[in-house]
Amino acid sequence: MNTYINSFMRGRELLKKLLIGDFLAAVLATFTRNNPGLMFFFSAATLLMFIAIIYIAAKYCRCPNCGKHIILGVLAIETCPRCKHSLTTGKKVKKSKR
């Protein structure tokens, strides 16, 4: 069964996985300081994952309705700041009463 996931949700999930991998590679690079080969490998992996994070954020992390790039707060935001549509369902979100 193939379920539909919009590009924003796919980008968000990829960013979560890449951020965790990037953090782990950076930590492993710091703990392998006495082995230069492993340190170089983990440092290069950290750099490559960081480049992939920038690419994924530029390609997928945009509002499906208006096309605005949403890079800051992409893991926490639920509605588009410009068009006020839900990023998961695409429906217009009503204003909350505060």
Image (cartoon, grey):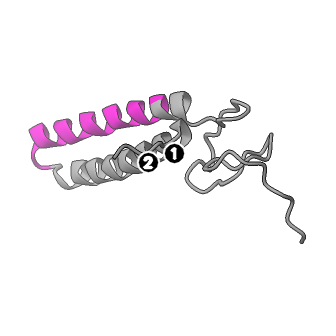
Where the C terminus falls, by quadrant? bottom right
Task: Say left or right for 58 vs 2.
Answer: right
Q: Position of residue 41 (x, y in %)?
A: 17, 37
Q: Are marks 1 and 2 in contact (CB under 8 Å)?
A: yes
The residue lying furthest to the front in this view is 1
Residue found at x 23% / y 48%: 29
Q: Residues within 10 Å of mark 1 (few under 14, many from 20)?
A: some
Tag 2's secondary structure?
A: helix
Which is more toward the observer, 73 or 40? 73
Residue found at x 42% / y 46%: 3
Amino acid type, mark 1: Met
Q: Position of residue 55 (x, y in %)?
A: 46, 28
Q: Which residues are magenta?
A: 34-55
31 relative to 50, above or below: below
Task: Say left or right for 88 vs 57.
Answer: right
Classified by dominant secondary structure, the portion drawn in magenta counts as helix
**Residue for badge 2:** 13
Quick check: is 68 in the magenta stretch? no
Amino acid type, mark 2: Glu
Which is more toward the observer, 6 or 61? 6
Q: Position of residue 78 (x, y in %)?
A: 66, 54
Task: Say left or right for 51 vs 92.
Answer: left
88 relative to 53, above or below: below
The numbered disc on residue 9 is 1
Tag 1's secondary structure?
A: helix
Q: Position of residue 23 (x, y in %)?
A: 35, 52
